[in-house]
Amino acid sequence: MRPLDEAETTQVFEKLFKFTSNNLKNIVESPSHEGLDKNPGRYCFRLHKNRVYYVSESLVKRATNIKRENLVALGTNIGKFTKSGKFHLTIQALNLLAANAKHKVWLKPTSEMSFLYGNDVVKGGLGRITDNINAYDGVVVFSMSDVPLGFGIAAKSTQDCRKMDPNGLVVIRQADTGEYLRNQEDL
């Protein structure tokens, strides 16, 4: 387990910024209340076996007693680096993104299952959408009862979504909570 280098940090922050915008500051400066320390530490990003973890500093200090090859995971796995060196967010980052998301989309109850099966969001399944979404912005997908279901990339802007037909693509799915069942061995 090691801290991210500058290039890796840039890739992680660019991907998180796509979904959180200026709320990225809340993620980076969030105080940690874990551990036995009286004064709260901070959360940090650590790399272990090409996976990026969001973990409290006090937990990182305690994990130094474990040999690197025996350490399986630590903190919240928010993403991984591919063999080509690109960073991809994983579904475990959903709670972090949902709490700090700038752009949100709410699905009608009839289209929630379609999204959870791995399909993209079409206009007919859209319940609500936040204003000022541009094409290719990162969006977090919620149910109408504000339960986070996943995240993706906006295919169209908010204004374009209002004019399109019901079968038009609104959100390109990147991850959804159905992956916990579909990809159990990879998570």
Image (cartoon, rainbow, N blue to C red):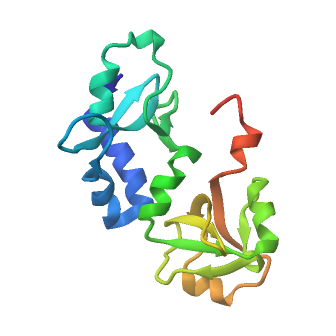
Determine if residue 168 is in view: no
Q: Position of residue 41 (x, y in %)?
A: 22, 42
Kindly give the residue lying farthest to the left in the view shown: 39
Quarter of the figure with residue 19: bottom left
Residue at (37% x, 58% y) in the render: 17
Left or right, residue 172 beside residue 73: right
Which quadrant is the C terminus positioned in?
top right
Residue at (53% x, 66% y) in the render: 139
Which quadrant is the N terminus positioned in?
top left
Residue 81, placed above or below residue 28: above
Residue 92, placed above or below residue 108: above
Residue 56, placed above or below residue 106: above
Kindly give the residue lying farthest to the bottom in the view shown: 163
Q: Position of residue 30 (x, y in %)?
A: 28, 53
Q: Position of residue 33 (x, y in %)?
A: 30, 45
48, 160: nearer the viewer: 48
Determine if residue 56 is in view: yes
Residue at (45% x, 65% y) in the render: 101
